[in-house]
Amino acid sequence: METIKLTINDKEITTEKGKSVLEAALDGGIYIPHLCHHPDLEPISACRLCIVEIDGVEGIPTSCTTPAEDGMVVKTKSPLVDNMRRLAMELLLSDHPAECTGCSQYLNCELQSVKQYLGISEELSVRKRLKPIPMNMSNPLIVHDFTRCINCGRCVRVCNDLRGVGVLAPVKTGRDQSAGIGIGGLSLKDADCRFCGACVAVCPTGAIRDKEEDLHGKKGRKALIPCRYTCPAEIDVPRYLRFIREGKYAEATAVIREKVPFPKILGYVCAHPCEDVCRRGSVNTSIAIRNLKRFAAENDTERLWEKNAFQKDGTDNKVAVIGSGPAGLTAAYYLAKLGHSVTIYEELPKAGGMLRYGIPEYRLPRNVLDEEIAEIEKLGVEITCDTKIESIEDLMDEEDFDAVVVATGTHAGVKIPIPGADCEDVLIGTEFLRQVNLGETPKVPKRVVVLGGGNVAFDCARIARRLGAEQVLMACLEFKDNMPAACDEIEEGEEEGIRIFPGKTFKQILNDGGKVTGVECLDVETFEFDEDGRLNLETVEDSESVIEGDMVIFAVGQRAIIPEDFDLDLTERGFIEVDEYTGETSEDGVFAAGDACYGTLTVIKAIASGREAAKAADQFLDGDGNIDEVLAPMPEYECYLGPGNNFARQDRCSNTCLLPEVRVENFECILETLEEDEAVTEANRCLKCDIRFNIKPVKFWGDFE
Amino acid sequence: MNFEQLKQKAVSEWEVQKQKVDMAVSDGILDISGIPSLEGQPRILLRNSGKISPDSIHSYIAMGGYEGLAAALSLSTDDIIGKIQSAGLRGCGGAGFPTAEKLKICGDAEADEKIVVCNASEGDPSAIKDRCLLESDPHSVIEGLLIAARTVGAAKAFICINPEYDVAIQRLEKAISQMTELGLLGDSIMESDFSVQIELKPGQGLFVCGEESALISALEGGLTRSKHRPPYPAVRGLNGDPTLVANVETLANMSAILGGAVSEPRTKLLTLAGGMKNGGVVEVPMDMTLRKIVTEIGGGTQDGKEVKAVQIGGPTGAWLTGDELDTSIGFDALTDAGTIMGSGSILVASEARCAVDMAKSALDFIHLECCGKCVFGREGTRQLADILKDIAKGSGKNKDIALLEELGGAMKLGALCDLGKGAPNPVLSTIKSFRSEYEAHIKNKQCPASICK
């Protein structure tokens, strides 16, 4: 690259040939006011603010369109230039609303910043007016407030030249002009917008903004790439979807593996909080992220992640992990990678915790579980099953462990102490699930009632159907629209013939001499849990009703069972007291992770918690606690997206599920993996929210000396 | 066919044809019989008007047409440019840039492909000179376009025409098909190594199409908006290829120069666009003064009152008055007088008109037609128009005249394109000559001519 030297304001600036005078100045730390210039866009010299004087050049050329030349002598200020800038700025402000505080760009507005730099007062010498363009809130994700548009043309250029989408154009409304949707009157969806957000990113004012309600009070990447940052493990979702689009499934899996050791398991059972916040959901339907994860993991034939994974040299440290659920396995995995010798102690006959003894096989095939647990054992982690640990002290003193991670989960189900709860056919959900998952086939009567509205309740209900119950009824406290179970659980459960009675509280289990006949319920008016988790409930008067059944299964919550000899401080609700960020317990060298710390949540949350515990334990053992790894290449972010071609209307891929009548016959996995073309199509629906951050930020004058 | 064979064929065909066909003259051309000051004046651009049939290529060739192209095919690029240069031809689209220089810049630009464009947009609604020329003698323009293509080395030519010019479009279409039939378009024209294709493109006919960068942007399928120059289209134009954009009249001049029909002094087509007894397109020597054109050819003001001011060049031209009317209509003379050749249309205001209103109607038009890209073009014209409106209706402020002058001065210096730079002309020129009328509107809230309400 040829370099040239020029003088700007008596300062010698070295720059590359081909750069403009404006770029040379900005790179060299000299600010020249500008608004239409953007580092990623072709200059158009529209705002006329970046004018300068150049020795030997007539007039006041715009520095954005003037190529820097060797030996050039440039002055960025002079009485003439200052006055021309003042007039240009006054003209830009002449139709811009004077009130700023109502605009979400307030204090982050380039127009305001340049106005301050130029010292323009509120009183303009030119005529002031407003563009009578109403704010348009009717589009998803993006607010158009073109009365604030200053016609810099950045959004138009980014939409047309950089992205190739071609939705935005300068629009004349009577005598007024602003940016707008090129084909007047169309919605962004109908105009084939791809909702990439580039227009928002480059808008120097508040004319094009993100909808506040979609940001959930967050800022930056956390607000705008919500899939990634809502994920407890912060899996880089847009990045692996990009690899799926490119047909690079090993790379996609490697991206998932950067944060979790169980891509396949998650592909089957993740509660996918990412999908709940997916911005595509505001356009029409969220991306089927979980299904795509499963597709990628099942099509990873190259195991790129394994080649790129870090493995530290062995240390002399021994770490014990109590419990082999997702939290314990994850902690063990990373501790082993950090070089420590790790032993997992599991009370039950096989490893997996709730993955094996809670989640039914039709949701998570056991070969998938076994396969990913085997990967952890491959690292040298020892899993000792059928071993219940009663004392941590013994582990440390007698077995010479240097650190312990407790990840014992919440395996104790609860019964609500109502009359009749002690009857023989009143079961506890977790115990019922464990029995089934241990390979037993408990006998169920024709009519089963499941109490509870979470995923565990659905597991019980759907297993009861598979064990032969003809009528399965569910009742729960919550109303239908805020039942804690995942939407697809509810939908699939109903398909399988399960009837749900939401908004019920349970008064007593009716029985005929100890033989269950049903549950007497009351309708709930309102309910809430207070800070201590206590229920405050109002019922509808005289709303008694009976849900008939011959067996009742309670699935209304789970507790942790922490042996007293662990000697750990517990919370009021009986979970292990830990430092929220590190997982440190009250005992030195003892860490805790997973449901045992915070109650029954999700697999992905447990994994994230296991990672934190591993980091903290490693630091305790004098390691650096660093488990970050880059397993797949960083992507080339797409700049060009091309025309939308009905992009916004493309619907989510449908789940390919076995027919309900077939499903209830056995415990086979009910959901099929996406076909390749389906997966690529679905990944193409992604809004690619991350590419917006590849647009260069504009420097404000305050960033210069 | 070589040119000799072509000419022989045309002459004999025309002998047969001319009995039967209509020597249609464009309806916009002023009948100059009985105007003494034009008697004996040379006609170059309108030399064929009324003497040929615009629908017959044979009539054009029989009258000496395509001799310029034949000559160009036997000359080197430098020789062609030399002839244009010594004839002193300047761009008749309005800016008056030396045509030879533009040809040379485009010819010298290094590129695999080059393009020539005939700008027949004629975006000033008061001007019809290009339309009349195309209607009365379409081949003289196309011949010039081919000479330009030959000179710069282009194999692709466009004619971007105002979509409302139905008759001209029909005649051009016919001309192009006749040329193709005779081998004057396509490969190896007149048995030479020169090949070119012409595409006729009805455009948007916008005022801003007079700005060549905006015309090219529209031709690329983009927005009809001016672009920063340099790079000039002659270096980097249509889709990045060097592109020579020339006005209809410039091209007709080129065929006249190469065909040997040129004389001194050079002539210019003007549209007598309004305010005079006579109206229409007229060809006058460039040393003729505005006063002579208005009084002797235009026949004086329509209402018989004294001439108050004359605007030449379209809406962005200045209003000239008094001694300024002794300006001849040469490019340099007009620039020296503070105005432009522009569209070549001439508008006359009699003493009955109001200066504020004259400026206001121009700015209302310019604001609506401006492309809206640069702040001075968009907001500057809006401010001028709004302030003039206030002044006209009696709500002007004392400092408004100073503001008009300040904004106008800034626009002339700071606007992106010539349209924006020219926009203040009608305002600044009327303030200069008729300041007292502005003051009467502001101070006395009165229009001395009783025009503004």
Image (tube, coloured by chain):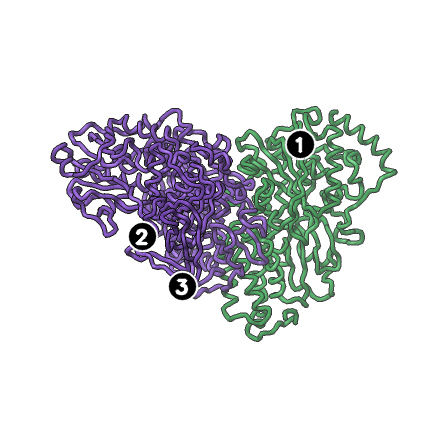
Chain colours: A purple, B green
Subunit ID for the residue under disc 2: A
Q: Specify whether residue A693 is in view.
A: no
Question: Would you name the residue on which mark 1 appears?
Answer: B197
Left or right, B307 with respect to A524, comes to right
Under circle 2, the secondary element is loop
Label 3 CA crowd tier, 10 Å (few <14, some 14–19, many 20+)? few
Question: Looking at this view, is A493 or B297 the one in front?
Answer: A493
Under circle 1, the secondary element is strand
Mark carried by residue A216 = none
Question: Would you name the residue on which mark 2 appears?
Answer: A417
Question: Would you name the residue on which mark 3 appears?
Answer: A121
Whole-Å distance between the Cαs marked 3 and 1?
A: 58 Å
Q: Do labels 2 and 3 share a chain?
A: yes
Whole-Å distance between the Cαs marked 2 and 3?
A: 72 Å
Q: Where's residue A197, x and y in %? A: 45, 46
Q: Which residue is drawn at 15% across and 29% down?
A: A316
Residue A69: quadrant of the picture: top left
